[in-house]
Image (cartoon, helix red, strand yellow):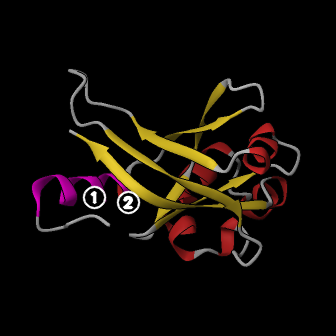
Amino acid sequence: MLDLTTEFGARADRRLREEAIGWFVTVRPDGTPIPVPVWFVWDGESIVLYSQPRAGKLRNIAANPRVSLHLDTDVRGDDMIVVTGTASVDETAPPMHELPAYAEKYRGRVDASFSGKFAELAADYSVAVRIVADRISGF
């Protein structure tokens, strides 16, 4: 998907692997886009994030699986990355604290903000969502 030999491709891949928070956008059945900040991991082809079981984002995905994930720009409004794709619940994904890339990326935040209770956080955010990217754009 990303051509890692280009400046944009390499930068987008690096940011998707390193950025801690992305804006996940789903669309309600009435057409209203709903952006929410999420933790996520990128494996080079898809994005995995976790949700609480009764979250609106899951209802939105069930009604319309087309989604996007945006990364914040720099202070000048440059370095924009937008991933568009199709989201679905991934029942094969392990809990967040057992997904190595996710655990490595967020363990420090969990230790600082949730008293290191990764398993308890994983029980609350127990639904894995996978976004299969079909386009990555930006500048």
> Residue 139 location in percent, x, y?
20, 38
> What is the secondary structure assignment of the residue under circle 1?
helix
> Overall secondary structure of the magenta stretch?
helix
Question: What residue is disc 1 on?
Answer: 14
Residue in view at x 73 percent, y 78 percent? 92
Residue in view at x 43 percent, y 69 percent? 45
Does residue 36 lie above or below 83 as drawn?
above
Does residue 82 lie above or below 1 as drawn?
above
Alpha carbons under labels 1 and 2: distance apart? 5 Å
Q: Amino acid at mark 1?
A: Arg
Does residue 90 lie above or below 49 as drawn?
below
Q: Is residue 84 left or right of residue 102?
A: left
Q: Which mark is residue 17?
A: 2
Q: Is residue 62 magenta?
A: no
Pick the front one: 14 or 5: 5
Q: Amino acid at mark 2?
A: Arg
> What is the secondary structure assignment of the residue under circle 2?
helix
Range of magenta residues: 6-16
> Residue 40 location in percent, x, y?
54, 55
Q: Are marks 1 and 2 in contact (CB under 8 Å)?
A: yes
Q: Label 2: few (<14), some or many (≥20) within 10 Å?
A: some
Q: Label 1: few (<14), some or many (≥20) within 10 Å?
A: some
Please state, as top left, top right, bottom left or bottom right, where the N terminus lies in the image: bottom left
Q: Quadrant of residue 35?
A: top right
Q: Quadrant of residue 26?
A: top right
